[in-house]
Image: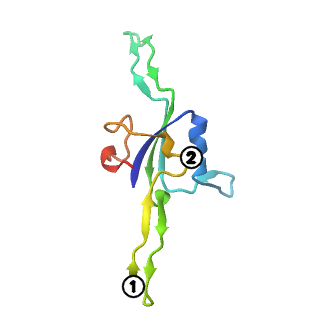
């Protein structure tokens, strides 16, 4: 499991990348993901808090990011590619182990961002720095 944070140009662009990870449709016509990763759409995150008076009226609007942010807790199967198959002898014993690599799915790496700390969201209390891609 690896955690990555992304900033896309728009919600539509982010959704397009998410959909490209794979979906299927059940017998009732409901679409669901076929990948096992957990995706949280944070949207336009607050960069600077707004200010409000005693009645709760906004005196200074919050400043939001221009980009659409999402956090992903990648399932290893969704981000691991086999570079070289394992070599087995006639008895099935591994002679040369499988060689794999881990990377963002196609088209995602360009939008990956690196932050200090956990940011505005974390998964299951996991530390981002310890699990980041």
Residue 33 appears left or right of 40: right
User: Is 90 rendered above or below residue 49?
Assistant: below
Q: Residues within 10 Å of mark 1 (few under 14, many from 20)?
A: few
Where does residue 19 sit, x and y in percent of width and height?
60, 48
Q: Residues within 10 Å of mark 2 (few under 14, many from 20)?
A: some
Residue 104 appears left or right of 94: right
Reading the chain from its start, which is encountered first: label 1 or label 2?
Answer: 2
Q: Label 1, on which residue?
A: 93
User: How many numbered marks does the figure carry?
Assistant: 2
Q: Are marks 1 and 2 in contact (CB under 8 Å)?
A: no
Residue 9, image quadrant = top right
User: Is 127 rendered above or below residue 75?
Assistant: above
Q: Which mark is in front, 1 or 2? A: 1
Color encoding of the figure? rainbow
Residue placed most toward the observer, 100 or 47: 100
Residue at 38 percent of width and 34 percent of height: 120
| The disc label shown at residue 76, or none | none
Q: Measure the alpha-carbon separation of dots 1 and 2.
A: 39 Å
Residue at 55 percent of width and 47 percent of height: 107
Q: Name the element at disc 2.
A: helix
Where does residue 116 sit, x and y in percent of width and height?
32, 36
Residue placed most toward the observer, 63 or 7: 7
Where does residue 89 sit, x and y in percent of width and height?
43, 86
Q: Name the element at disc 1.
A: loop
Residue placed most toward the observer, 58 or 76: 76
Quarter of the figure with the N terminus: bottom left
Where does residue 8 sit, x and y in percent of width and height?
53, 36
Q: Label 2, on which residue?
A: 18
């Amino acid at each position: 499991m690896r955690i990555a944070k992304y900033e896309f140009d728009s919600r539509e662009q982010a959704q397009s990348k998410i959909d490209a990870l794979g979906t299927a449709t059940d017998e009732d016509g409901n679409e669901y993901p076929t990948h096992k990763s957990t995706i949280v759409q944070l949207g336009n995150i607050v960069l600077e808090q707004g200010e409000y008076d005693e009645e709760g009226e906004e005196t200074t609007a919050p400043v939001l990011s221009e980009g659409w942010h999402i956090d992903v807790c990648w399932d290893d199967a969704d981000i691991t590619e086999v570079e070289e198959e394992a070599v087995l002898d006639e008895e099935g014993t591994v002679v040369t182990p499988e060689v794999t690599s881990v990377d963002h799915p196609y088209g995602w790496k360009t939008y990956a961002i690196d932050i200090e700390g956990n940011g505005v969201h974390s998964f299951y209390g996991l530390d981002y720095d310890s699990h980041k891609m």
